[in-house]
Image (spheres, rainbow, N blue to C red):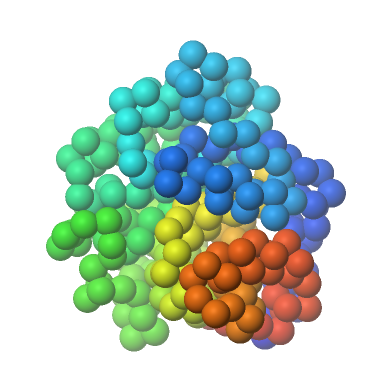
């Protein structure tokens, strides 16, 4: 169970979003675009999924958060992300970026090497392999999946907090590392979250949904709180959905219902969160 004061702060973020319904501009991949839009809605925000380079500046300018995803990337989507990021920076709009495939593509590596220092995302999300690669640390990549030998565990969490925390602080961002255990750091505070179920890995796009959830909560809270809340909500909703599902098909449907219907009491009682 979470500390009462800390829980109250996170739940206030969630309630504020449901009341204010901010507009979240998502430029994401076609594999998960529908699920990301529905996850934003389930959280209480409003999605807009525009990606044409000639209109994204206008769309970003009226949004409260910009949510980017490098999955299944195209030339036009890369151009749109650059334009939107420049607009977000000009209008002081917070941005979340998902590093999908960053460790297995030189195109994405080069794009991020320029993009991150230039536009300063509030939250950078990825699996451990994508995060390590982007931080310039050897990650032994063999695809878009995380290297299982480098997953963050209770045993190595303190070491990772020091290693990744330095990079996060230097770049003034929050790192959200998704996996069997989620890890979040801004260089000042680091957390290890142990909610979730293996079934979350049996449907496509749950990492993208986590990115979209983080973007949904960002207008009402700090980047650290938005990332923490998103990881807790998705993990706990996944646990509840798995308990009533027969397989990935029913789990997929039930996951959105559980995010939408999740009670504050569920978060308080079921949160498995450790401050490092």
Q: Quadrant of the N terminus?
A: bottom right
User: Is residue 85 or residue 31 the one in the foreground?
Assistant: 31
Q: Is residue 265 visible?
A: yes
The mark tally for this picture is 0
User: Is residue 165 or residue 156 the one in the foreground?
Assistant: 156
Q: Check the image and report above or below for 201 versus 265.
A: above
Q: Check the image and report above or below for 246 versus 200.
A: below
Q: Residue furthest toward the top? A: 54
Q: Position of residue 245 (x, y in %)?
A: 58, 78
Q: Position of residue 182 (x, y in %)?
A: 46, 70
Name which residue lies at 67% across and 25% down: 62
User: Is residue 161 or residue 7 the one in the foreground?
Assistant: 7
Residue 47 lies left or right of residue 153; in this view the side is right
Q: Residue 29: which quarter of the image? A: top left
Q: Position of residue 129 (x, y in %)?
A: 27, 61
Name which residue lies at 41% across and 69% down: 201
Name which residue lies at 61% across and 23% down: 59
Name which residue lies at 18% across and 59% down: 141
User: Is residue 29 or residue 66 the one in the foreground?
Assistant: 29
Residue 239 lies left or right of residue 207; in this view the side is right
Q: Position of residue 205 (x, y in %)?
A: 45, 56
Q: Is residue 224 visible?
A: no
Q: Check the image and report above or below for 155 versus 230.
A: below
């Amino acid at each position: 169970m979470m500390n009462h004061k800390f829980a109250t702060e996170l739940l206030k973020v969630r309630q504020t979003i449901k009341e204010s319904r901010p507009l979240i501009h998502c430029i994401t991949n076609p594999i998960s675009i529908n699920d990301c839009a529905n996850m934003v809605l389930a959280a209480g925000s409003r999605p807009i999924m525009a990606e044409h380079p000639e209109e994204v500046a206008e769309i970003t300018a009226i949004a409260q958060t910009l949510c980017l995803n490098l999955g299944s990337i195209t030339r036009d989507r890369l151009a749109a992300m650059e334009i939107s990021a420049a607009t977000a920076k000009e209008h002081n709009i917070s941005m979340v970026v998902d590093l999908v495939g960053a460790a297995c593509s030189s195109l994405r590596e080069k794009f991020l090497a320029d993009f991150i220092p230039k536009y300063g995302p509030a939250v950078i999300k990825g699996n451990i392999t994508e995060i390590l690669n982007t931080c310039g640390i050897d990650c032994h990549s063999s695809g878009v999946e995380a290297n299982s030998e480098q997953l963050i565990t209770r045993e190595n969490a303190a070491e990772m907090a020091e290693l990744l925390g330095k990079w996060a602080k230097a770049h003034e961002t929050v790192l959200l590392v998704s996996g069997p255990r989620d890890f979040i750091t801004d260089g000042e505070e680091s957390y290890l979250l142990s909610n979730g179920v293996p079934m979350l890995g049996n449907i496509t796009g749950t990492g993208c949904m986590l990115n979209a959830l983080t973007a949904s909560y960002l207008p009402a809270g700090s980047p650290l709180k938005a990332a923490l809340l998103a990881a807790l909500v998705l993990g706990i909703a996944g646990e509840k959905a798995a308990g009533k599902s027969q397989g990935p098909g029913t789990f997929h449907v039930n996951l959105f219902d559980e995010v939408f219907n999740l009670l504050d009491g569920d978060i308080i009682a079921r949160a498995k969160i450790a401050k490092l």
